[in-house]
Amino acid sequence: MNNTETQNAYEVTIGLEIHVQLATRSKMFCRCNNDSENAEPNTNVCPICMGYPGTLPVTNKQALEFGVLLASALGCEINKFQRFDRKNYFYPDLPKGYQISQFFYPVGEHGKVEVDYLGEDRKTKKEFAVGITRLHLEEDAGKLTHGTTESLVDLNRCGTPLAEIVTGPDIHSPEQARAFMYELQRIVRSLGVSMADMEKGHLRVDGNISIRPVGQTELGSKVEIKNLNSFKFLEQALNYEVGRQSEILDKGEVVVQETRGWDEKTGTTISQRIKEGSVDYRYFPDPDLPPVVYGLEEVGKMVADPERLPRKLREKAKSLGLPYDRVVELQDMAKLEEFVELATDVVGQDATRSVLVANWVVRGMEDLSSDKRREFLRAVLEKSLSNTIATQLLKELISSDRSVEEVLANLSQVDSGAIEEAVAQVMVDSPQEVERYRAGEAKLIGFFIGQVMSKMGGGAEPALVKEILDRLLTK
Ligand code: ZN
Ligand code: MN
């Protein structure tokens, strides 16, 4: 079932709510280690994060800074007055009976993320923008594991700092939703505020989706899909909903506003609860926590450097002459930053040279220091080294600490004998060209270089070939 099978044309509207686990050293309001990945259940806890009455939370400064850093990277206006509120509800994984969150004064609001991504054909660049309604900080709850006869509670995750991001209803296809999440993951990782591993629950997403006939002004009824824990499931669940809702509207029926869950076994969404009005969490300011108040200068020190954001990196790579599909390839390999740094120094804006540098970055120069990488690439570009020679050079640079010049001089010595032989052979094979060259037809040098290079199977340095040719031809 998908939207192409439907009889009528519908417009899809999607908004996302994302929880990002922040990789701070300690938890949001206590000194417990924030990394529970290898901890036994209920061992990484203290009276504060277990919600004992009478304990006092203290706000984690690093979490506050991460909040500002991330919100600014998402283009949000940063609130200089932020405050924590209590969101009251009862659940077994929430021993306090309330979650500390920011309702009235979040970290940031009114942001915008511009996304560009490679279409299915792996050639076309697609672009769209997503408004960020708000980003606020809060604490995570514990984890419940449901067995057949019992349910288990693990409170290790209680108090883990979260950034909750709410997007505007600006996403218009499941493919865009996935592209946005990938971009968000890249942003979060580039800032170092979270590992952002979806499978590990560092990045959790709920999708709100509705469809309406093209041309209709009011939005259709909204279905919320909870806790999608992979990029693939996000796209699949949304695609399934587009199909399901289209069929309902095709029949002239009405989509029920409800919360649904993704069932990966059947590849369908399943109704979980019908929403009748909104839940009242009775939010009020947490009396245990002072508000956070920043001066303009303080905020200025915490905001993200726009030059280092993934989109900016893509733009830089593009302006260095690299085609968009190669930009995305390097980005997917997490090597775009390396490319931009190297290419900025050695390339200029020449597309051919950019592609050459990209090829070497893809092949990997991890065993070379960044200075040596530059030296190596400069030599490859400036001396137009053949692939064979460049590969040998790279190998030598990795295994010894000789300079590029030393290695090249050595490689040339080894080579020059073989090149001289090839040149002599070419001269014997082409006596007329030799005569014409000696009579002043200088452009024939290209012909000779070509002949010698093909005799050497590409394994010679063109500059050296030319040098030897010059010497032997003018004898
Ligand atoms: Zn604790
Ligand atoms: Mn939340």
Image (cartoon, helix red, strand yellow):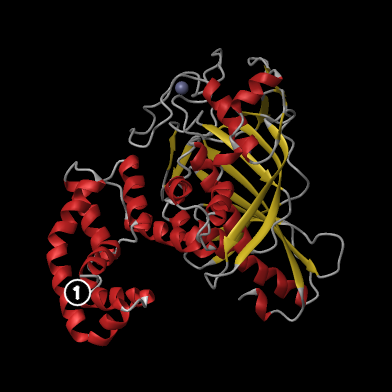
Q: Callout 1 environment at 10 Å: few (<14), some (14 to 19), or many (20+)? A: many
From this viewpoint, is residue 365 visible? yes
Relative to residue 159, is residue 214 drawn left or right?
right
State the residue at coordinates (50%, 41%): 190
Q: Nearer the viewer, residue 219 or 327?
A: 327
Relative to residue 227, is residue 172 drawn left or right?
right
SS for dot 1: helix
State the residue at coordinates (35%, 52%): 377
State the residue at coordinates (41%, 48%): 147
In this rendering, the answer to whether 195 lies above or below 315 is above
**Residue that numbered label 1 is attached to:** 423
Q: For disc 1, does the CB lie below 8 Å from ligand 2?
A: no
State the residue at coordinates (48%, 44%): 196
Q: Nearer the viewer, residue 269 or 321?
A: 321
Q: Nearer the viewer, residue 463 or 48?
A: 463
Examine the image and state in which quarter residue 96 appears: top right
Relative to residue 52, is residue 175 drawn left or right?
right
Say what amino acid the circle numbered 1 marks: Val
From this viewpoint, is residue 254 visible? no
